[in-house]
Image: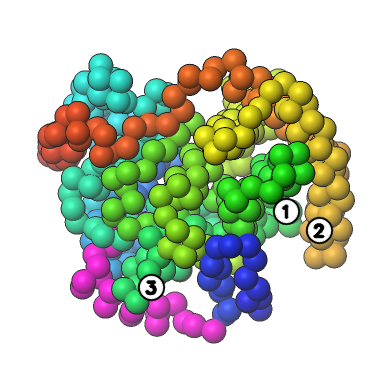
Amino acid sequence: MGDFYQNGIITTLHDLKQRPLEHMEDELRQFSQTRPMGLILPSLFSELEGDALANIVNELSKVDYLNEIVIGLDRATEEEYRYALKFFEPLKQNFKVLWNDGPRLRAIDEKLRNEGLAPTEPGKGRNVWYCMGYTLASGKAESIALHDCDIVTYDRSLLARLLYPVANPNFNYEFCKGYYARVASGKIHGRVSRLLVTPLIRALKRTIGHNDYLDFIDSFRYPLAGEFSFRADVMTDIRIPSDWGLEVGVLSEMNRNYANNRLCQADIADVYDHKHQELSPEDAAKGLSKMSIDISKALFRKLATNGIVFNSETFRSIKATYFRIALDFVETYYNDARMNGLKLDVHSEEKAVELFAKNILAAGQSFLDNPMEKPFVPSWNRVTSAIPDVLEQIHTAVDQDMEEYS
């Protein structure tokens, strides 16, 4: 049975195993009459070739309270885009597929790039940003969920629990972050969250002292979860990173724009498993190595905007403090795994900690070397101020693509 403990400064909505899914879906159907709901799915074409997304589509086909599903498709040729349109046909909801590599959306991206308003690099953040733009343009949803397309253990209860806090008109939440135990196949997963983010936050607290932002991030049980939901007005002013810092960047924007009582986190799954990234110790531009650098930089940048001053000596102290705390966490998780009959390889865990420690220092140096770096994609408010009809252009381009290639 789930606990009901409230940790940190963000409301936690637990799964206490007392309510049938059908009862929650009944309420969501009622909410949808006055607060229509949508879903954003950022996807690579390669995910259409696996088993996870096919199951997600099958589960979503059973959901009747969604008004719209917006799918962002990356790394797809024309033939693959045509295949994608057929692939998503089992969805019974109104759905749109953004062909991000197609000539129409590329032309809009080039126009934004010429104005210095486009995402600077490809990736999930860029995909999500354009999906948000289309969702704003369509105006069909007031409460929107977003989740990944590689969830092997997906069932529709995840979506219901994720949307409920921002769909219920009796709640005042603008944003909900999903969380879950990253345990599957007899192992504890989630290395970046367990062995990088939490110990790094604790190390930063020791090094720079008490900080409200660090308390905020430390309140989330799974800050790197790719699943969150929000009210439509959140999309207009949010500035998100286009790299692996997306999840931390979104939380930072929520911290900047909203009071804590407008934010919450919800337990959305008993079991959660998805595609696992390689550690990639030999290449800092790939896998968990790149992820750890991008996330560390996202944290450092946010703290700097709050007035924290960093230098090389500071980052060396942070790295040393992190290393000791993270090694202690390895022992903690080993004991937790053993007590629950799970496997945990201490050697591989400590190798990850060593890589993350090195990358914290690399991220710090990159931060010092590039003080004028623009890590965030501009907000849609700024983009529409510069190009007033850009959302209509995106809406038209997507509709024309789907009509032409269906």
Q: Is residue 82 visible?
A: yes
Answer with mark 1 or mark 3, whichever residue precedes in sequence.
Answer: 3
Q: In the image, 389: left or right of 21?
A: left
Residue 132, x across and y down, in percent: 30, 44
Q: Residues within 10 Å of mark 2 (few under 14, many from 20)?
A: some
Amino acid bearing label 3 = Phe
Q: Say which residue appears at 39% left-offset and 38% top-offset.
A: 239
Q: Residues within 10 Å of mark 1 (few under 14, many from 20)?
A: some
Give the vertical position of 336 relative to 402 (above or below).
below
Which mark is on residue 188? 1
Residue 52, x across and y down, in percent: 48, 50
Mark pair 1, 3: CA separation: 33 Å
Q: Is residue 311 magenta?
A: no
Q: Between residues 312 and 234, which one lies in front from this camera angle? A: 312
Q: Between residues 295 and 11, which one lies in front from this camera angle? A: 11
What colouring does the structure picture have?
rainbow
Which mark is on residue 337? 2
Q: Secondary structure at mark 3?
A: loop
Q: Viewer-nearest of labels 3 and 2?
A: 3
Q: Secondary structure at mark 1?
A: strand
**Image quarter of the C terminus:** top left
Which mark is on residue 171? 3
Amino acid bearing label 1 = Ile
Q: In the image, 316: left or right of 220?
A: right
Q: Is residue 229 visible?
A: no
Q: In the image, 334: left or right of 195?
A: right
| Discs 1, 2 touching: Cβ within 8 Å | yes
Q: Say which residue appears at 28% left-offset and 68% top-offset.
A: 65
**Image quarter of the N terminus:** bottom right
Answer with mark 1 or mark 2, whichever residue precedes in sequence.
Answer: 1
Q: In the image, 183: left or right of 348?
A: left
